[in-house]
Amino acid sequence: MKINPLVKNFVFVILILLVVGGVFSLLYLPDQQANEVSLSQLAGDINQDKVKKITVSGDSVEIIYTDDKKASSMKESNSVLSDVLVNLGADKTKLQKVEISASTQEESVWSWLLPALLYGILPLLVIGFFLWTMMKQTRGSAMQVFDFTRAKAKIFGAEGHSKEKITFKDVAGLKEAKEELVEIVDFLKFPKKYLDMGAKIPRGVLLLGSAGVGKTLLARAVAGEANVPFFSISGSEFVEMFVGVGSARVRDLFMTAKKAAPSIIFIDELDAIGRHRGVGMGGGHDEREQTLNMILVEMDGFEKETGVIVMAATNRGDILDAALLRPGRFDRKITLDPPDVHDREAILRIHSKDKPLAENINFKEIAERTPGFSGADLANVANEAALLAARQNKTHIFQNEFLEAIEKVLLGPERRSHLLSKKEKEIVAYHEAGHALVSASIPGTEPVRKISIISRGMAGGYTLQLPSEDNKLRTKTQFLAEIATLLGGMAAERLIFGEMTTGASNDLEKASHIARKIVKDWGMSSLGPISFEDKEAVMMGAGLENNYSEAVAEKIDGEIEIILRGAEKRATEIVAKRRDMLAKIAKTLVEKETIERDEFEKIIGVPSTKKKVENRK
């Protein structure tokens, strides 16, 4: 819990006062109370030979008896103690036996100076300190208003910031992107070589790629290779509710980077402030545009000798303002592709190097089962595998943990507590068997890796299909086969139980999405090679109206219906023709709950043509 600074200061002052009080108590703690005797009693004690020594200090009389007890008394001023005692009846002979001494020591200066300091000056000092502390706190609160306009950039590679250094060796794959950035590294390390030739290094480098492909990691690797400070900030951190804060933070960031030159400024999620200007109304948009304008101005102010490189990352390069992309600003655009099977294997090795692995780990198999996974997804797979192994109290991570982690990342954790009734279990088994059977019956589909009726995430069961190799391009035939596979579960339910269940809702959603893309985006329908999706209008916030007529909209709906009806008919014919095989797969699923690829292919018998294709691969 955070304590209020004023409360903390008040408690601090109270503690000081308590300490001062303790000092007073120690300095002025009264001595042990001495026995007070009268001078007449003293005269009598002298006559009885009880007194050993008398010390006179001014009007004070200190008495030490023969038994070492002490007492005190007082005499009149300007009187002689011996005469007073004789007058009070003391025997002169016995008085002469008593040692009488006079203390002539002057009073110490500290006896009056120390009390004056403690009682007069020290309270003033305590009060002054308390007031100074409060004023300091007030000044700190006032200075926070000015700190509000400072850029909140994270600094890597500078002195005092001992973050882990990242180089190109720590970034697997992305060979072409690294080659593009080697020149940037060389300029930061040896700028004179380029300046002597009159060359201008690009001021801005824009990293484009989908989420998780390693844009930020690659930018940090550039700074690590060049051994220069790396100022990292997100685009959303520039924009606040107060107008002008974003521009002030941009100025502060660039000023700081110039002082630390050579250096790198990295702006993550550039699309948060770099969208097309003039879109929408309102203060938030105005502030964002002012921030963007300031970035453009600061990048124009770079000289050849500045030594500051601005790097930015986004996965929405299509919505960036044109002024950002013109020469002189972000004029070098580097696209980062998702890793292929070899890159995925290398990424898995990097993220698993500090983990205790079993000897039989096959990273190639894991890489083949993760097509389309980004670097962040693969890091998550390695971490989930470690968590699964630790949960089972294992000392090493085995292959099964990695394969289980892939399914967990794709579909979510197993929900074994989600128990199905006997009837529901049978329905799910036939549903998943329909998917698998239709997929295996259509040439060109992806192989079925696993079928399960164990719930994962929101799915009651699943049929896992993963390609044997990465596909950059896909044909209409492949899309139609995928739609038919998606509708295979629904077709199996209708064939066996006479009606469909809500379990097919997600399949219908995916199938409709693919069919709509076939017609509207990819021009693969009878409407011809026309794209009906106006991405620019959607990007500019004007996507409420279609860029085609109502008549064309009816034709698009008709084409989508034709595709979906055709896929439905195809799936229904397959499950009806191979009903016995469908029942066999479903019965095995009910008994075992999970069927792996090898067992599935034994059940259905892999077609010879499919075997030839796989052997050729």
Image (cartoon, grey):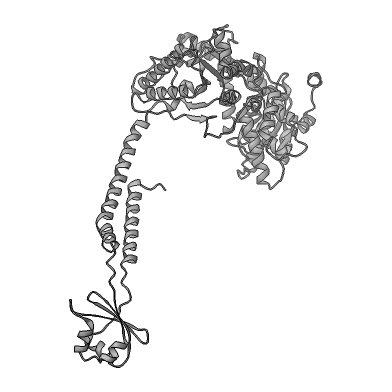
Q: Residue at x 32, y 69 (%)?
A: 29
Q: Quadrant of residue 301?
A: top left
Query: Where residue 5 sits: x, y (%)?
Result: 35, 46
In front: 542, or 244? 244
109 vs 338, left or right, is left
56 vs 335, left or right, is left
Q: Is residue 496 visible?
A: no
Q: Is residue 186 visible?
A: yes
Count of picture labels: 0
Query: Does 536 sit above or below residue 64?
Result: above
Query: Where residue 11 sits: x, y (%)?
Result: 34, 53
What quarter of the picture does the C terminus occupy?
Answer: top right
In front: 568, or 123? 123
In front: 194, or 337? 194
Query: Where residue 526 sits: x, y (%)?
Result: 59, 8
In front: 135, or 80? 80
Q: Quadrant of residue 33?
A: bottom left
Query: Does 598 sit above or below residue 267?
Result: below
68 vs 610, left or right, is left
111 vs 76, left or right, is right
